[in-house]
Image (spheres, grey):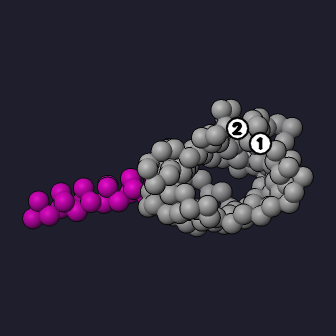
Amino acid sequence: MNTFRGLFLGLSILLSSVALVAQNHPNFTGTWKLNVAKSQMGTTQVTELTVEVDHQDPVLKYVARGKADGQPFEETESVTTDGKPSRDSHGVRVEANWDGPDLVIAGTADDKSMVYLVRLSLSKDGKTITRAFTYKDDPEQRHEIYEKQ
């Protein structure tokens, strides 16, 4: 009987800690606008960008609309935050995992070489997302600041 009680107590503690860990992950849902003046954009030609995010963990979907090289663009993506691999709209293999409160998204080619690496961080007040972005063909890391609309 004591073994059963100990097992039950241990299981309860484990489930409680899993729930606490899950609560530490921020929710990125909202409409976010790139603040170009506060961002370090590297060599990208993006001049406007608004991102609509629907984050129902473990699924994060977004639609990005903006201008690059003077041309409008729109991109729709979906990733899971639990590390399950998927493909983005360009055919790149994508895996997203939590690193504490940050979401890290790695895009790799079929030969496992890095295509891009993204780290998303939500400010404590929930009004700003910082996106650190490294792309294989761009030697400068981008540091983008998005403000909640």
Picture quadrant of residue 124: top right
Mark 2 neighbour density, 10 Å: few (under 14) some (14–19) many (20 or more): some
Counting from the top left corner in percent of width and height, residue 32 is at: 77, 55
Residue range in magenta is 1-23
Numbered circles on residues, count: 2
Prevailing SS of the magenta stretch? helix
Tell me the residue that label 1 is attached to: 44
Closest to the observer, 34 or 55:
34
Q: Looking at this view, name the residue that lies furthest to the right.
A: 70
Closest to the observer, 102 or 137:
137
Residue 31 in view of the camera: no
- Quadrant occupied by the N terminus: bottom left
Closest to the observer, 69 or 2:
69
Tell me the residue that label 2 is attached to: 142
The amino acid on which the numbered mark 1 sits, given as a three-letter code, is Thr
Q: Name the residue rendered at 59%, 53% in the picture.
A: 26
Mark 1 neighbour density, 10 Å: few (under 14) some (14–19) many (20 or more): few
Judge from the rendering whether residue 32 lies leftward or rightward of residue 27; answer left or right: right
Counting from the top left corner in percent of width and height, residue 126 is at: 71, 50
Q: From mark 2 to mark 1, how far is it between C-alphas?
A: 8 Å
Q: Which mark is residue 102?
A: none
Q: Is residue 3 magenta?
A: yes
The amino acid on which the numbered mark 2 sits, given as a three-letter code, is Arg
Residue 38 in view of the camera: yes
Judge from the rendering whether residue 91 lies leftward or rightward of residue 17; answer left or right: right
Q: Is residue 27 above or below residue 125?
A: below
Judge from the rendering whether residue 115 lies leftward or rightward of residue 34; answer left or right: left
Counting from the top left corner in percent of width and height, residue 139 is at: 65, 32
For the residues bearing labels 2 and 1, Cβ distance under 8 angstroms: yes
Mark before the other along the chain sequence, 2 or 1: 1
